[in-house]
């Protein structure tokens, strides 16, 4: 992996974790987008499972395979939480979070 991409990928990844939920909130809930964005940002709390990892941060580790709240069973739960209206905004944040983490894993494989 080129040194530049090795340095830029984590920064881009973190920026996307902030920008994508904001854009999604603005498009889906234009009247209350700020509150929707904050609730979706609460989905970042699933990254607390990084504290359980052997190393807190490894730029070459795919979080979808390394952390318990990023696995297939939690992903299914997050998808099911899209159904009830009361949990939909948070679930959108969680699903977006996993999708961005998945795209980061693919980016690691591509380079």
Image (cartoon, grey):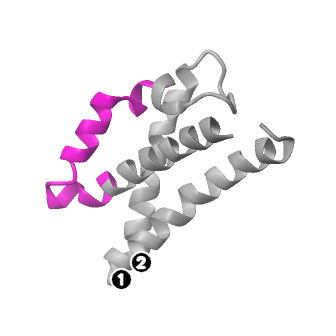
**10 Å neighbourhood of mark 1: few (<14), some, or many (≥20)?**
few
Check disc 2 and report its element: helix, strand or loop: helix
Does residue 24 appear left or right of residue 60 in this picture? left
State the image coordinates of residue 91 (x, y, percent, origin top left): 30, 52
Along the line of sight, which residue is nearer the eye, 49 or 5? 5
- The residue that mark 2 highlights is 26
Residue lying at the far left in this picture: please name it.
84
**Magenta extent:** 67-91
Q: Is residue 76 within the magenta segment? A: yes
Of the numbered discs in the image, which one, if any, rests on residue 30? Answer: 1
Mark 2 vs mark 1, CA separation in Å = 5 Å
Q: Is residue 80 within the magenta segment? A: yes
Along the line of sight, which residue is nearer the eye, 6 or 93? 6
Q: Are circles 2 and 1 on residues that touch, CB within 8 Å?
A: yes
- Quarter containing the C terminus: top right
Does residue 61 appear left or right of residue 95 in this picture? right
Residue ID at (77%, 36%): 1
């Amino acid at each position: 992996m080129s040194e530049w991409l090795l340095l830029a990928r984590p920064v881009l990844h973190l920026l996307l974790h902030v920008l994508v939920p904001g854009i999604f909130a603005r498009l889906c809930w234009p009247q209350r987008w700020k509150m929707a964005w904050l609730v979706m940002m609460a989905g970042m709390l699933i990254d607390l499972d990084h504290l359980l990892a052997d190393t807190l941060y490894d730029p070459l580790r795919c979080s979808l395979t390394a952390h318990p709240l990023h696995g297939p069973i939690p992903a299914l739960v997050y998808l099911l939480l899209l159904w009830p209206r009361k949990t939909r905004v948070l679930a959108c944040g969680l699903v977006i979070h996993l999708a961005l983490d998945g795209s980061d894993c693919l980016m690691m494989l591509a380079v």
